[in-house]
Image: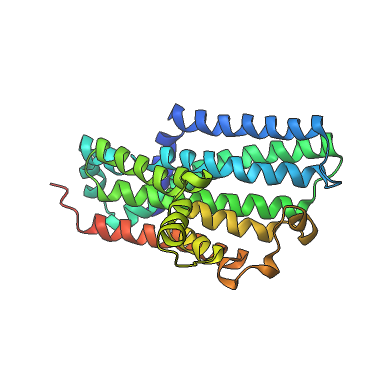
Amino acid sequence: MSAFGVMRKDILDVRRAKIVWFVGLLFTLVTVLFFYQINVSGGFRGLPEVLLALWNLVFIGALFIPAIALVAAYLSIAGERESGSIKFLLSTPINRRELVLGKFLSRTSVVSASLLVAFVIAAGLSVVWFDELRLGTFVAVAALTTLYALAYVAVAIAISASTSSRSRAMGGALGFYFVTNLLVIFGDLSIRGLLDYVLNDLLNAGVGQDPLTFITMVISPTQSYLSSVLLAFPDNFLTVQRLNPEEMAWYVRGEMGLALLAAWLVIPLLIGIWRFDRANIG
């Protein structure tokens, strides 16, 4: 059995996991509601409605998509280690690296499929409600959002490969979601807000906003994603949103966000393979 063999077998199991499809369906419903709200309220400052809808979708996706990815993958290996079924898999002609890669491929397939459904529906609504699609922006947002989701899948696989029980895997996934997502999105209560308070208010270090953004990008796939999506939108739209990439330091622009997002996909997966290679299965 190869990594692709593990993927095919695992997909049959994952697709029966109702919680994965429930979270994916919830994201799709929220997408429809956001597009409908833009359709009812109309544009803003003359901006194209479809761009406003996609802009809002990015921020709601930043909250929901990690949950989809983590739920889909956090038990992929730890669950089988706790039940003992992992021993059967490893008794077949497959090594541990192939098993981890197979689990990653299967879970990314499921997550990508749920996102594809949401974006296909959103594209249809754009044509019906806004009479335009803005295909370039739509494809770019969909691609970056999928990469964002796969980065969290890689993290979940790494957590699952590094733990031997369901409870530890769940605790690791919840902790990672809280620190790298909830503590990034919510303004003054975020990690960035804390850094700003400590460095500038308490220590009076005079650290600018761009360095604070970069630190958050390094420690959070969510901030990397929010930075990378600037590449998807036209400059005149970003200007109205009070964002001008030309005025940002090079290390917080969309290109750096994309590079760090890719790193968030590759590095955790390599850590997961390394950890599982050295795990004592018993």
Against 158, residue 121 (above or below) is above
User: Residue 115, percent across and down?
Assistant: 59, 41
Residue 36 in the figure: left or right of residue 177: right
Picture quadrant of residue 106: top left
Please indicate, yes or no, whether residue 221 appears anywhere in the rendered image: yes
Residue 205 in the figure: left or right of residue 241: left
State the colouring used for the structure image: rainbow
Residue placed at 43% from the left, 49% from the top? 180
Please indicate, yes or no, whether residue 1 appears anywhere in the rendered image: no
User: Residue 30, percent across and down?
Assistant: 63, 31
Residue placed at 37% from the left, 58% from the top? 268
Q: Nearer the viewer, residue 70 or 214?
A: 214
Residue 89 in the figure: left or right of residue 15: left
Against 32, residue 248 (above or below) is below
Residue extending farthest to the left is 282
User: Residue 8, percent across and down?
Assistant: 43, 44
Residue placed at 53% from the left, 46% from the top? 187
